[in-house]
Image (cartoon, helix red, strand yellow):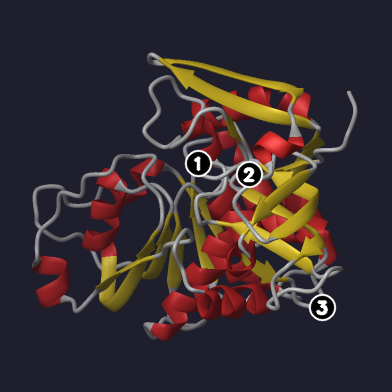
């Protein structure tokens, strides 16, 4: 079969489409899935960096996301014909992933799709959409409700950010989208953002430990100094959900937001989340967005040969929305 294969050796990396032996690559699992769709994620771009610490095996079929149909199963958990989504659990990093027409894994790593989600729709969401919905559910659990005030989404034109804007807007939150790309304002407003701001929106009262109370909540896809700035700008009782680190992994802040404004910092993980959590999030995504909104999120559809170009755009921060991958598509 044809697959997008990443190889690391002596600090160098090669990533290309080539023919692979299924008997060699389809190992370690009790379920085979015919992959109908995959998609591009920022983690995929991290895998193809030279000396990557994210790629845990070589050679590796990339693709942290996949959706399709179970075609063979020796597990009582999943029947042949079940539509499933695969993400987390090391797909595309330590286990062969979705950039191929077929994958094999343990049944426990797969989530059966709700009745209203087909494979393509599942990949319009993908890990990004899963993370965005998990973030929305975490905000609601923390008490941030529609009508409480502005909810900030950072990195708003990216995968998680764009889906988060659309999901929050569909739930009637007042969404403020933050982006450093002036030409994406119209796109974000079309997804439902009430306002679009630049990266300087958090540069408030830098001489003081806290800024003006502005946001009821936030979905942060950036991390680093951006996350620290959000903590300074949350209202009393507000919450920020963190899921990204493109702006840096370190967090330099003070205890003041927590002990004087009672704010919450919540984390979202899509890799090791248990099955019950995954089922809840994917069920919440079923019918969450109208079809026309979902299509606005899709930047383009590509085949395996175009993955390298797409990943390079992600690495440069030049991507918008969701890029779907059809692993069976010819040139």
Residue at which label 3 appears: 115
The residue lying toward the viewer, choosing from 230 and 242, is 242
Crowd band around label 3 with a 10 angstrom C-alpha radius: few (<14), some (14–19), many (20+): few
Image coordinates of residue 107 in percent, x first then y, are: 64, 67
Image coordinates of residue 269 in percent, x first then y, are: 42, 62
Q: Nearer the viewer, mark 1 or mark 3?
A: 1
Q: Secondary structure at mark 2?
A: loop
Quadrant of the snapshot with the C terminus: top right
Left or right, residue 259 beside residue 18: left
Q: Farthest residue to the right: give it.
A: 330
Tag shown at residue 97? 2
Quadrant of the snapshot with the N terminus: top right
Tag shown at residue 93? 1
- Residue at image position (56%, 32%) is 314
- Residue at image position (82%, 40%) is 326
Of mark 3 and mark 2, the one earlier in the sequence is 2
- Residue at image position (84%, 69%) is 80
Of mark 1 and mark 3, the one earlier in the sequence is 1
Image coordinates of residue 131 in percent, x first then y, are: 52, 62
The residue lying toward the viewer, choosing from 277 and 60, is 60
Q: Is residue 172 visible?
A: no
- Answer yes or no: do the residues labelled 1 and 2 have beta carbons within 8 Å? yes
Crowd band around label 2 with a 10 angstrom C-alpha radius: few (<14), some (14–19), many (20+): many
Residue 210 occupies quadrant? bottom left
């Amino acid at each position: 079969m044809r697959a997008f294969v990443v190889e690391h050796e002596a600090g160098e990396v090669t990533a290309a489409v080539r023919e692979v032996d299924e008997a060699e690559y389809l190992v370690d699992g009790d379920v085979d899935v015919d992959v109908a769709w995959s998609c591009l994620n920022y983690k995929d771009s991290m895998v193809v960096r030279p000396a990557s610490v994210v790629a845990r095996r070589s050679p590796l079929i990339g693709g942290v996301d996949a959706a399709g149909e179970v075609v063979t199963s020796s597990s009582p958990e999943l029947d042949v014909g079940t539509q499933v989504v695969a993400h987390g659990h090391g797909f595309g990093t330590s286990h062969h992933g979705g950039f191929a027409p077929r994958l094999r894994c343990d049944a426990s790593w797969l989530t059966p799709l709700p009745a209203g989600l087909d494979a393509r729709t599942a990949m319009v969401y993908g890990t990004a959409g899963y993370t965005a919905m998990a973030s929305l559910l975490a905000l609601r659990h923390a008490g941030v409700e529609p009508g409480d005030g502005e909810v900030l989404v950072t990195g708003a034109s990216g995968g998680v950010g764009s889906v988060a804007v659309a999901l929050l807007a569909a739930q009637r939150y007042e969404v403020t989208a933050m982006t450093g790309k002036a030409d994406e304002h119209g796109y974000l407003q079309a997804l439902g953002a009430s306002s679009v701001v630049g990266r300087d929106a958090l540069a408030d009262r830098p001489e003081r430990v806290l800024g003006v109370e502005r946001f009821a909540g936030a979905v942060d896809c950036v991390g680093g100094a951006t996350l620290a700035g959000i903590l300074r700008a949350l209202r009393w009782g507000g919450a920020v959900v963190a899921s990204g680190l493109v702006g840096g992994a370190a967090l330099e802040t003070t205890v003041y937001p927590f002990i004087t404004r009672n704010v919450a910092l919540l984390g979202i993980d899509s890799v090791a989340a248990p099955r019950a959590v995954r089922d809840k999030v994917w069920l919440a995504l079923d019918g969450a967005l109208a079809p026309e909104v979902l299509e606005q999120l899709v930047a383009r559809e590509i085949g395996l040969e175009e993955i390298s170009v797409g990943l390079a755009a992600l690495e440069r921060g030049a991507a918008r929305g969701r890029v779907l991958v059809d692993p069976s598509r010819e040139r």
